[in-house]
C-alpha cells in the first residue's frame, strides 16, 4: 500500500477491484516460505520405520519398482531433499531393488531456483543428524551444498496447487504447512480431492503437525493421529 501511495485497506480493495492483475502481486506477498531440513523429526522417523516399509511392500505387490513421492509446497527443497536423504541413507540398503523418485512442486520461482542450487545456511540443516550432514553436503564458505548424488531423484516443478497437481500416481504425499493452514475450507476440500485423485489406495498423506484435514473428509483414515499422517 505504501508503494502504491494508498492509505486505507478500503482504498486498496477498490484498487484491487479496478486492477485485477494486482491480485497476483498480493498473492505473491502473502506467501510464507519458511522451511528447514528434517522439520518435525518424529514425522520422518515414523516414515522411515513404519510407513515407507509398508509402502514399499505394497508397491512390490503391485510389481512396481519404486515408491512415488510428492512433496507439495516444497520450499527451497528442504522437505524433498530430506526424503531423498532418508531414502538413500536409511532405506536403500534394505530395499536395494526399489527406487524412490520424488516430485517437488512449489509456486514460487525464487524457491524453485534455490531448490535447484541446493546450497543452505547452517540454520537450515542443523536439525539433520551430524553423520547425514557430513556425508551428504560439501561446505562452501557459509553454505552447505547437497552433493549431486542426493539430488538425482528429486525433480522440481513450478506449479500452483490451486491450479494443478503433478501427473502420476503417488504412494506418499507430503502437503505440510500450506493448504491446511493458509487456504479456506472450500479450497482445502477441492485441493484434497485433487490430491486424493493422484494417490494410490493404501498410500500415505502427511500434513503439518498443526494442521488437520477438513471436517467430514472421506477417503482417508488416520495412520498416526499424533503425527497427522493419513492413509488413503
Ligand atoms: C511454509 S512453506 C512449507 C514448506 C514445507 N512444506 C515445510 O513444511 O517445511 C510453504 C510453501 O508453499 C509454497 N506455496 C505457497 N502457495 C502455493 C501454491 N498456491 N501452490 C504451491 N506452492 C505454494 C510457498 O512458496 C512455500 O515454499
Image (cartoon, rainbow, N blue to C red):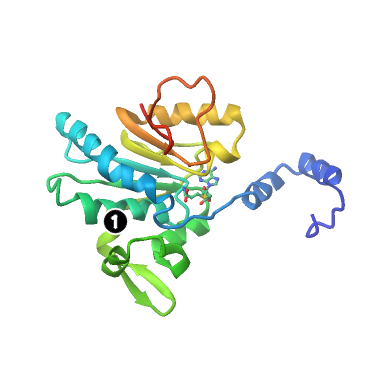
| Residue 61 % position (x, y) | 15, 29
Determine which quarter of the picture holds residue 196: top left
Q: Residue at x 29, y 27 (%)?
A: 202
Determine which quarter of the picture holds residue 23: top right
Few, some or many C-alpha atoms within 10 Å of disc 1 (few <14, some 14-19, many ≥20)?
Answer: many
Quadrant including the N terminus: bottom right
Residue 48 located left or right of residue 2 = left
Residue 165 located left or right of residue 54 = right
Asked if residue 58 is positioned above or below residue 83 in the image, the reply reads above
Q: Residue furthest front?
A: 226
Q: Is mark 1 within 8 Å of ligand 1?
A: no
Helix, strand or loop status at disc 1: helix
Q: Residue at x 22, y 53 (%)?
A: 90
Quadrant including the C terminus: top left
| Residue 151 % position (x, y) | 30, 59
Name the foreground residue: 91 vs 45.
45
Q: Residue at x 67, y 50 (%)?
A: 25
Asked if residue 221 is positioned above or below residue 179 in the image, the reply reads above
Name the foreground residue: 107 vs 201.
201
| Residue 133 % position (x, y) | 32, 66
Judging by the rendered image, the residue that carries numbered circle 1 is 85
Amino acid at each position: 500500500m505504501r508503494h502504491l501511495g494508498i492509505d486505507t485497506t478500503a482504498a486498496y480493495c477498490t484498487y484491487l477491484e479496478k486492477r485485477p492483475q494486482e491480485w497476483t502481486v498480493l498473492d505473491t506477498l502473502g506467501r510464507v516460505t519458511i522451511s528447514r531440513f528434517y522439520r518435525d523429526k518424529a514425522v520422518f522417523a515414523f516414515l522411515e520405520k513404519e510407513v515407507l516399509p509398508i509402502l514399499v511392500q505394497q508397491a512390490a505387490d503391485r510389481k512396481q519398482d519404486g515408491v512415488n513421492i510428492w512433496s507439495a509446497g516444497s520450499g527451497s527443497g528442504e522437505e524433498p531433499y530430506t526424503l531423498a536423504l532418508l531414502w538413500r541413507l536409511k532405506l536403500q540398503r534394505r530395499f536395494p531393488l526399489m527406487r524412490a523418485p520424488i516430485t517437488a512442486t512449489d509456486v514460487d520461482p525464487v524457491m524453485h531456483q534455490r531448490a535447484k542450487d541446493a546450497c543452505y545456511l547452517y540454520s537450515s540443516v542443523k536439525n539433520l543428524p551430524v553423520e547425514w550432514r557430513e556425508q551428504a553436503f560439501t561446505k562452501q564458505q557459509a553454505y552447505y551444498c547437497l552433493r549431486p548424488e542426493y539430488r538425482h531423484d528429486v525433480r522440481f516443478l513450478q506449479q500452483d496447487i490451486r491450479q494443478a497437481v503433478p501427473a502420476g500416481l503417488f504412494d506418499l504425499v507430503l502437503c505440510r504447512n500450506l493448504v491446511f493452514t493458509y487456504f479456506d475450507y472450500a479450497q482445502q476440500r477441492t485441493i484434497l480431492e485433487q490430491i486424493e485423485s493422484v494417490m494410490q489406495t493404501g498410500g500415505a498423506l502427511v500434513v503439518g503437525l498443526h494442521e488437520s484435514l477438513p471436517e467430514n473428509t472421506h477417503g482417508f483414515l488416520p495412520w498416526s493421529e499424533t503425527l497427522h499422517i493419513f492413509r488413503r
